[in-house]
Image: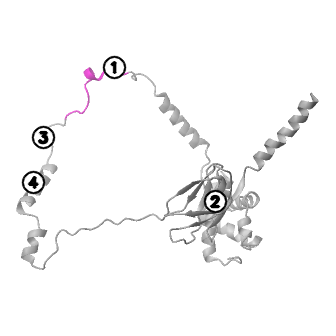
């Protein structure tokens, strides 16, 4: 009995350590086809549902394991998915996003005008026969129906037995009930007053990692100023104070910060 307990004490830490060290940090840089850095790009670990944003230089860091799938998302660029292999952790990943093309349909000119009105009219104006036919068709389409339209249904004689007659659509009733339940349980989005906004911003500072702001030399007063800016531009207290999800709130903050840096001078930029 003592021997069994002694062996089990060695086995348990082994599995715990394997679980702890399975997650690693993987880094990389994101560029476009011209090898220019693009930012911010949303980097999502699809396997663990963790996410981050690339910095101003296109660099990113995220926790991942071998065989995890990373997804790179940027507006106006094609999405890229990358399944991680063991060798990907040895050096930074190089990710290239292709910009979406906007196709403009080609305009073909069937006839080039010569400047001679008599000759050009023969090509550009419709013939008398075509004009007359169009007029007759217009009059026909506007005229009332002289005969009733046929009933486009199958006679019951040939339709066979309807096994659904008199039965309740259980699946339809269930789906409707689920929709009503979700609508009833989800909090209604309403405008936040001053007290609710302050409570929301306080919760953001307590539960969200704001290290990416301090990285740019922002002190507490500057962080408070940015949070007010983010709330005003992204209406965060209105949307998330009743349904606070840390990962979504953090993503909204990083998107707002990408715009905030364009109009505010920061020390480390």
Per the rendering, the mark at residue 161 is 1
**Residue closest to the eye, 221 or 71:** 71
Question: Could you tell me which residue is drawn at 17 percent across and 36 percent down?
Answer: 148
Position of 46 with respect to 34 (left or right) is right
Please rate how many residues cluster around mark 1, counting C-alpha atoms within 10 Å: few if below 14, some from 14 to 19, many from 20: few
In the picture, the quarter occupied by the N terminus is top right
Residue 73: x %, y % from top left: 55, 59
Circles 1 and 4: CB distance less than 8 Å?
no
Residue 159 within the segment the image draws in magenta: yes
Which marked residue is nearer to the observer: mark 3 or mark 4? 4
Classify mark 1: helix, strand or loop: loop
Residue under label 4, please give it: 136
Over which residues does the magenta segment extend?
150-162
Tell me which label, 3 or 4, sits earlier in the chain: 4
**Residue closest to the eye, 176 or 119:** 119
Residue 77: x %, y % from top left: 50, 63
For the residues marked 1 and 4, what is the alpha-carbon distance in whole angstroms? Answer: 47 Å
For the residues marked 2 and 3, what is the alpha-carbon distance in whole angstroms? Answer: 64 Å
Tell me which label, 4 or 2, sits earlier in the chain: 4
Position of 85 with respect to 202 (left or right) is left
Tell me which label, 2 or 3, sits earlier in the chain: 3
Residue 94: x %, y % from top left: 59, 64
Which marked residue is nearer to the observer: mark 2 or mark 3? 2
**Residue closest to the eye, 40 or 29:** 29
Residue under label 2, please give it: 251
As drawn, 26 above or below 173: below
Residue 219: x %, y % from top left: 76, 72
Circles 3 and 1: CB distance less than 8 Å?
no
Residue under label 3, please give it: 146
Q: Main secondary structure of the magenta part?
A: loop
Quadrant of the rendered image containing residue 212: bottom right
């Amino acid at each position: 009995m003592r021997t069994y307990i002694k062996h089990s004490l060695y086995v348990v830490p082994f599995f715990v350590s394997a679980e702890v060290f399975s997650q690693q940090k993987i880094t990389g840089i994101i560029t476009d086809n011209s090898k220019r850095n693009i930012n911010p790009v949303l980097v999502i670990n699809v396997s663990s549902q963790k996410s981050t944003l690339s910095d101003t230089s296109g660099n990113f860091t995220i926790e991942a394991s071998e065989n995890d799938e990373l997804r790179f998302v940027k507006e106006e660029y094609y999405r890229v998915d990358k399944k991680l292999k063991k060798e990907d952790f040895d050096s930074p990943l190089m990710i290239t996003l292709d910009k979406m093309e906007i196709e403009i349909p080609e305009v073909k000119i069937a006839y080039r005008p010569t400047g001679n009105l008599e000759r050009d009219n023969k090509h550009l104006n419709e013939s008398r026969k075509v004009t007359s036919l169009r007029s007759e068709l217009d009059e026909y389409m506007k005229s009332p129906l002289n005969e009733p339209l046929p009933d486009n249904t199958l006679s019951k004689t040939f339709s066979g037995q309807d096994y659904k007659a008199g039965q309740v659509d259980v699946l339809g009733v269930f789906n409707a009930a689920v929709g009503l339940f979700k609508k009833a349980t989800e909090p209604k989005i309403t405008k936040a007053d001053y007290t609710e906004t302050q409570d929301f911003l306080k919760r953001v500072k307590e539960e969200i990692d704001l290290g990416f702001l301090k990285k740019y030399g922002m002190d507490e007063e500057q962080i408070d100023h940015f949070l007010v800016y983010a709330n005003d531009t992204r209406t965060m207290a209105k949307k998330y104070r009743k349904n606070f999800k840390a990962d979504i709130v953090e993503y909204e903050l990083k998107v707002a910060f990408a715009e905030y840096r364009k109009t505010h001078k920061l020390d480390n930029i």
